[in-house]
Image (cartoon, helix red, strand yellow):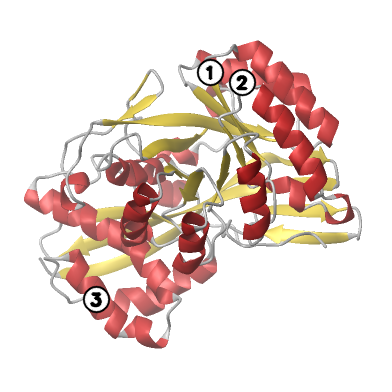
C-alpha cells in the first residue's frame, strides 16, 4: 500500500462557561479541551486513524516533518518505516520521533484493516480480550463532593475511581476518608497528588507527604500518584520503601532513561505512561519487559478521547493483567453522566460507544483499532488557539498556562 496523505486535524471544545476551581495554593481556570485526529490515507482509499496531541507545535511537526517523509512510501512493516525515519528526519530533529510514534498508530490501524486483523495481533498477539478501567475525574472539590462522585462512578459499573486532591492536607485526607465510607472496602481508590508540588510556597513538603501516605495506606488506597516532583527519584525511593501505600509515577518522565531509572531503582510500584506523548507503541513495548523483570506493574495514563483509550487498549491486551493492570478512563460530565466537566468530543470522535462491561473495556477483534471514527468532529469542533487551562499560584504570585502537553514539568516556585 502506498501512503498518499498524512493529515493532523486540531479540535477544540470550549466549555460553556470558564470553570474556576480553587485549591490550596491558588486557583485553576479551565476554558476548553483540545484534541487531535490524525488521518492517513493510502492510494486504494483505505484510511487509518490515530489520536494525537492537541497543540499547534505537534500539528506543525507532523505536517512539516512526518508527513513529507511518509507520503509516497509503501506501508508493509511499521517497524521498518520507523527505522528509516530514525536514520532520516529524526537523525537531525530527534524531537520528531515522538510525533512520528503518534502517526505510527494510524499506520498500524491501516495495516490491520488491510490484513483483516486487530492492531493487537500486529503488536505481538493478544492474551486477553479485556482490560480493566478506572474512572478518572474529581478535581478540587469539597470532601463530600469527592465522596458523592466516587459513589456515582461506582454506580456506572467501574471498579475504581481516581481523584485529584489539593485542597489542603487535612481536607485531602478527609475527602479520602469519606470516599472510602461511600464506596466500601472492595472498591479501588487512586489519589493523584500532582497538585501537591505545584502550589508554589504552599506546596506540600516531604514530611507532610509521608504523613499523608501513612494515613492513605490505612484506608487501603490502591496507589498514591505523583505526590512529589517527578524528577525527585530519590524522594520517590524513600517514600516507596516506607511501605505506607503503593506509589505510582511515570507520566512526566521526559525520556526512556528516566523510565529505566524509575524502574531499576524501584522508585514506584506502578509505572505509568501515556502513549500519546511518551513514545507510542515502540516505547511501551521496550519498557514492558523491564517492568516485568523488576516485578512491578503498569497502568496506562490516558486523558483524552475514546480513540486514545482504544489505541492504548490494543497494546494492553497483549500482556497479562498481572503486568498491565489498569487503563485510565477519563469521566466527563456531558450527557448527564458524573464526571469532571463536559467534553462531548471525547465520545463523539467515535461513531459507536466503547463496550464497557463491569468496569472492563472489551477490546474488539475487528480489523485495525476496531472502532469507526466520526470525521464529522473535524467540522463540528474547530480549533481554538491558545492554552486550555491556567494555574494561578498565590505565592509567589504567578500564572502558568497549560497546553495539551501534559508532560511539561513545573513546580510553581
Residue marked by disc 1: 187
Query: Mark 1 Cα within 10 Å, few/some/many (few <14, many 20+)?
Result: some
Left or right: 24 with respect to 349? right
Marks 2,3: beta carbons within 8 A:
no
Which quarter of the image is occupied by the N terminus? bottom left
Answer with mark 3 or mark 1, whichever residue precedes in sequence: 3
Give the alpha-carbon distance from disc 3 to disc 1, as whole Å.
44 Å
Task: Identify the residue shown where x is 27% and y is 39%.
Answer: 317
Residue 379 x/y as whole percent: 43, 51
Answer with mark 2 or mark 3, whichever residue precedes in sequence: 3
Question: Mark number for residue 328?
Answer: none
Residue marked by disc 2: 150
Which quarter of the image is occupied by the C terminus? bottom right
In front: label 3 or label 1: 1
Secondary structure beneath disc 1?
loop
Secondary structure beneath disc 3?
helix
Residue marked by disc 3: 83
Residue 402 vs 151, above or below: the answer is below
Give the alpha-carbon distance from disc 2 to disc 3, as whole Å.
45 Å
Residue 142 seen: no
Task: Identify the residue shown where x is 82% and y is 50%.
Answer: 203
| Most foreground residue, 116 or 262 | 262
Amino acid at each position: 500500500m502506498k501512503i498518499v496523505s498524512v493529515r493532523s486535524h486540531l479540535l477544540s471544545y470550549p466549555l460553556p462557561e470558564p470553570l474556576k476551581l480553587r485549591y490550596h495554593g491558588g486557583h485553576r481556570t479551565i476554558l476548553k479541551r483540545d484534541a487531535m485526529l490524525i488521518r492517513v490515507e493510502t492510494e486504494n482509499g483505505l484510511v487509518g486513524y490515530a489520536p494525537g496531541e492537541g497543540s499547534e507545535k505537534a500539528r506543525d511537526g507532523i505536517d512539516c516533518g512526518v508527513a513529507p517523509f511518509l507520503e509516497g512510501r509503501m506501508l508493509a512493516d511499521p517497524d521498518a518505516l520507523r527505522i528509516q525515519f530514525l536514520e532520516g528526519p529524526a537523525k537531525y530533529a530527534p524531537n520528531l520521533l515522538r510525533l512520528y510514534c503518534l502517526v505510527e498508530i494510524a499506520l498500524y490501524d491501516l495495516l490491520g484493516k488491510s490484513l483483516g486483523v486487530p492492531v493487537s495481533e500486529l503488536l505481538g498477539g493478544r492474551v486477553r480480550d479485556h482490560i480493566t478501567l478506572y474512572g478518572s475525574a474529581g478535581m478540587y472539590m469539597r470532601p463530600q463532593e469527592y465522596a458523592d462522585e466516587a459513589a456515582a462512578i461506582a454506580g456506572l459499573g467501574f471498579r475504581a475511581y481516581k481523584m485529584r486532591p489539593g485542597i489542603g492536607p487535612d481536607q485531602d485526607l478527609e475527602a479520602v476518608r469519606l470516599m472510602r465510607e461511600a464506596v466500601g472496602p472492595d472498591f479501588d481508590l487512586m489519589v493523584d497528588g500532582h497538585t501537591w508540588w505545584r502550589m508554589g510556597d504552599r506546596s506540600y513538603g516531604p514530611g507532610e507527604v509521608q504523613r499523608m501516605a501513612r494515613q492513605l495506606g490505612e484506608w487501603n488506597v490502591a496507589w498514591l500518584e505523583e505526590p512529589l516532583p517527578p524528577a525527585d527519584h530519590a524522594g520517590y525511593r524513600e517514600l516507596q520503601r516506607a511501605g505506607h501505600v503503593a506509589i505510582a509515577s511515570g507520566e512526566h518522565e521526559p525520556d526512556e532513561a528516566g523510565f529505566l531509572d524509575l524502574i531499576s531503582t524501584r522508585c514506584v510500584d506502578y509505572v505509568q505512561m501515556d502513549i500519546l506523548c511518551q513514545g507510542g507503541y515502540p516505547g511501551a513495548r521496550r519498557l514492558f519487559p523491564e517492568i516485568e523483570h523488576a516485578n512491578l506493574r503498569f497502568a496506562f495514563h490516558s486523558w483524552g478521547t475514546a480513540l486514545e483509550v482504544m489505541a492504548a487498549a490494543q497494546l494492553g491486551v497483549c500482556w497479562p493483567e498481572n503486568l498491565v493492570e489498569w487503563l485510565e478512563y477519563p469521566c466527563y460530565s456531558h450527557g448527564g453522566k458524573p464526571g469532571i466537566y463536559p467534553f462531548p468530543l471525547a465520545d463523539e470522535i467515535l461513531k459507536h460507544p466503547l463496550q464497557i462491561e463491569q468496569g472492563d473495556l472489551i477490546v474488539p477483534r475487528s480489523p485495525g483499532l476496531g472502532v469507526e471514527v466520526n470525521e464529522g468532529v473535524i467540522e463540528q469542533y474547530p480549533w481554538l488557539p491558545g492554552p486550555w487551562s491556567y494555574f494561578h499560584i498565590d505565592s509567589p504570585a504567578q500564572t502558568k498556562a497549560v497546553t495539551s502537553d501534559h508532560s511539561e514539568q513545573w513546580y510553581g516556585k
